Image: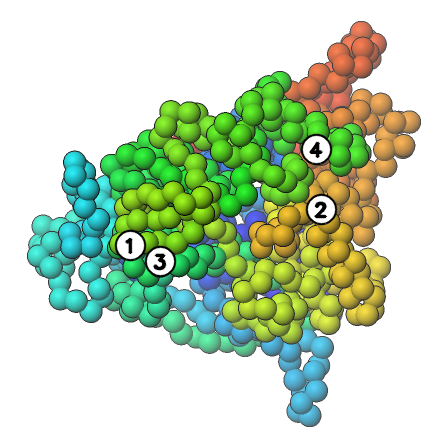
């Protein structure tokens, strides 16, 4: 009888885990509390009092190329953009689910309440897991209110434009949930009440339809600086949601795929309780229009901070960007016209780290000049922290629309902030782009994850996957790679599925796993600066190869050079796309060579090697393994190659 596996979460990591477990003959059930698949890639407009599962904002575009984002045996359609908007990614995940027939194994609207070891009548652990879920039923329309701006809470500045109204109104300070309705509230205003409508059915190909006129979907009025109980009360009033049908299941294995980008991490600045303007975490940010004509402080210069600062600067009177340590700003495309992540080749990763730092920092200097003039040049080397991929922020700094400041020291009054260099500024709104906490409320984090401190993001997992003392549980996607998380999560899932099915080598004893975790942590601390965001940081190619060795799918370069010099050159010098790990080993895919060739389309390896004439005579091109027709089995999957996504609205 097949072993039973529970997969928690139907995002990119959960779908990969589900697919790989099925491929290894396991009996799998996937639970997700949302009504559709996609996880964080399913865009949901924030509503009043709601705590959305997704941190996507409306204009989100991925900063990794489609070649480096794709699953190893399911390429992104060729006619899709290189850097995809979020709805393309959601559609891609839906196509992946349909192609591998995964949906019938997913139970939607099932919130996992608890995962505990199953005990027998004598109180002994049976070696299995008891998973408690609760069915979430959403009945009736979900109303999206547009609370009125409270004039008594807004910082006043001479010449300041009045706040916008209607669909573009900012939720600056809404009335307290228990306060009586004001004349402008939706329930008290018949005209506005008529404009309320049920939430649109989500279509990953299109995203949500825009809210009707008069409905505000900017960001939630959830007050992140106070207790969440009023927000929960407001959410209960606004959404007719009933939760019922609690069920218990028993599984041999559990794979947690809920990720680490849903619990905002908030800094504790002195005096912040006196601030009277807007306080919002990037998790709740959706559109920039509410910040029109305001002075906005963005705390954090990572990917989200740089993107939000850039977008808001087109509407705000000015944006102040606060950064603790500076950051290396990397463009999405290099001076050679290549997507920057295509530089992530095996040759590049074979270079000693000091030399790699010199090369990468020189490329940044060549493209942007000295980052010191922007106030962003960090003291750490390039590979010691996660770089910021953004092609526009420096232009907004040069235009004076974004002003860079060091870290915040304190809030000194209802709208004044002081920085560590002693400078002060008045601001109307603060957007925290300060990352996330690792949290799994349905688990005993201390016992399973090894979290010694509640606020720490350091978890003690063997190879970032397996708890030391629980060999029948795994975490997929609980890692922060320098590249895309999707192929990394898939590689983790391949190993986990083979371990749970008994087809891979068994895990080491707990004592040995503990020693390896400690040793890996020592090496980790040597490479990265001490920040919470780096506790689960891994280098893409190094980590992929490490896990691939356990799976048995690392490409054999010596064999490739003997049998196919062009494919060997593409694997060696081209981008390290996930297709390379389907050339051999378990569940190899015959379409991998063509997918690798397409990923190398921007680099003419034949011209570089000087063998273009010889290759032409042999009927070989650098854009593909052969100009001759290929059998259907060697082509990429028909579904992604032939389907196109409707143009975004």
- Up the image or down, 471 lies above or below 578; here it is below
Side of 400 relative to 341 (left or right): left
Q: Tell me if I can see residue 527 in this picture.
A: yes
- In what quadrant of the picture does the N terminus appear? bottom right
Mark 2 or mark 1, earlier in chain: 1
**Which dot marks residue 357?**
4
**Which dot marks residue 413?**
1
Depth-wise, is mark 3 or mark 4 nearer the camera? 3
Q: Residue at x 65, y 36 (%)?
A: 382
Read off the residue under disc 2.
527
Depth-wise, is mark 1 or mark 4 nearer the camera? 1
Report how far apart the C-alphas of labels 1 and 4 lie in the structure. Answer: 43 Å
Percent position of residue 235, x then y: 30, 64
Q: Are marks 2 and 4 in contact (CB under 8 Å)?
A: no
Give neighbour class at mark 4: few <14, some 14-19, many 20+ (Cα, 10 Å).
Answer: some
Mark 3 or mark 1, earlier in chain: 3
Report how far apart the C-alphas of labels 3 and 1 lie in the structure. Answer: 9 Å
Q: Residue at x 73, y 44 (%)?
A: 544
Give neighbour class at mark 3: few <14, some 14-19, many 20+ (Cα, 10 Å).
Answer: some
Give neighbour class at mark 1: few <14, some 14-19, many 20+ (Cα, 10 Å).
Answer: some
- As helix, strand or loop, the secondary structure at mark 2 comes to helix
Q: Are marks 2 and 1 in contact (CB under 8 Å)?
A: no
Read off the residue under disc 3.
272
């Amino acid at each position: 009888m097949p072993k039973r596996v529970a997969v928690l979460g139907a995002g990119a990591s959960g779908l990969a885990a589900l697919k790989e477990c099925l491929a290894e003959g396991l009996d799998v059930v996937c639970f997700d509390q949302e009504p559709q698949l996609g996880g964080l890639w399913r865009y949901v407009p924030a509503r009043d009092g709601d705590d959305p599962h997704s941190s996507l904002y409306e204009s989100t575009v991925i900063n990794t190329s489609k070649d480096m984002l794709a699953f190893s045996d399911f390429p992104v359609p060729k006619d899709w953009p290189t850097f995809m908007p979020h709805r393309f990614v959601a559609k891609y995940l839906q196509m992946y689910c349909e192609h591998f027939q995964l949906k019938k194994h997913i139970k939607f609207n099932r919130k996992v309440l608890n995962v505990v070891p199953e005990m027998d009548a004598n109180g002994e652990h049976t070696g299995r897991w008891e998973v408690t879920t609760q069915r979430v039923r959403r009945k009736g329309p979900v109303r999206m209110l547009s609370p009125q701006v409270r004039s008594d809470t807004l910082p006043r500045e001479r010449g300041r434009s009045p706040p916008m109204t209607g669909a573009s109104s900012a939720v600056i300070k809404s009335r307290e949930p228990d306060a009586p309705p004001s004349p402008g509230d939706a329930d008290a205003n018949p005209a506005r009440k008529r404009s309320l409508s049920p939430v649109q059915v989500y279509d990953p190909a299109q995203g949500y339809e825009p809210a009707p006129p008069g409905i505000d979907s900017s960001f939630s009025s959830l007050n992140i600086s106070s207790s969440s109980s009023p927000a929960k009360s407001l959410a209960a009033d606004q959404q007719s949601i009933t939760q019922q049908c609690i069920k218990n299941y028993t599984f041999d294995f559990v794979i947690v795929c809920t990720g680490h980008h849903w619990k905002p991490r908030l800094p504790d600045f002195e005096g912040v309780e006196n601030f009277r303007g807007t306080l919002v975490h990037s998790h709740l940010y959706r559109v920039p229009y509410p910040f029109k004509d305001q002075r906005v402080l963005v705390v954090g210069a990572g990917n989200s901070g740089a993107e939000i600062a850039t977008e808001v600067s087109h509407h705000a009177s000015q944006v102040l960007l606060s950064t603790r340590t500076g950051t290396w700003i990397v463009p999405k495309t290099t001076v050679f016209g290549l997507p920057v992540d295509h530089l992530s080749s095996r040759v590049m990763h074979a270079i000693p780290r000091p030399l790699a730092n010199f090369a990468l920092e020189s490329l940044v200097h060549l493209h942007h000049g000295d980052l010191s003039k922007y106030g962003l040049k960090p003291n750490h080397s390039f590979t010691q922290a996660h770089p910021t991929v953004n092609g526009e922020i420096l232009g907004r700094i040069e235009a004076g629309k974004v002003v860079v400041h060091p870290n915040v020291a304190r809030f000194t009054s209802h709208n004044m902030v002081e920085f560590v260099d002693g400078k002060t500024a008045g601001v109307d709104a603060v957007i925290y782009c300060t990352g996330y906490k690792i949290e799994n409320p349905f688990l005993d984090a201390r016992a399973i994850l090894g979290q010694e401190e509640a606020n720490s993001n350091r978890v003690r997992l063997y190879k970032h996957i397996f708890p030391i003392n629980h060999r029948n549980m795994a975490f997929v996607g609980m890692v922060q790679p320098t590249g895309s998380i999707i192929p990394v999560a898939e590689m983790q899932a391949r190993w986990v599925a083979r371990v749970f099915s008994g087809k891979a080598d068994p895990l080491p004893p707990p004592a040995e796993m503990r020693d390896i975790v400690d040793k890996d942590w020592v090496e980790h601390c040597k490479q990265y600066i001490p920040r919470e965001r780096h506790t689960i940081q891994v280098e893409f190619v190094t980590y992929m190869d490490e896990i691939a060795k356990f799976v048995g799918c690392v490409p054999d370069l010596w064999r490739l050079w003997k049998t196919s010099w062009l494919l060997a050159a593409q694997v060696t010098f081209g981008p390290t796309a996930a297709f390379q790990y389907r050339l051999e080993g378990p569940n190899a895919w015959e379409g991998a060579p063509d997918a690798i060739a397409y990923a190398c389309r921007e680099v003419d390896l034949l011209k570089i090697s000087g063998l273009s004439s010889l290759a032409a005579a042999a009927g070989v091109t650098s854009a593909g393994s052969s100009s001759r027709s290929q059998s259907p089995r060697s082509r990429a999957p028909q579904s992604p190659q032939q389907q196109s996504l409707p143009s975004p609205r």
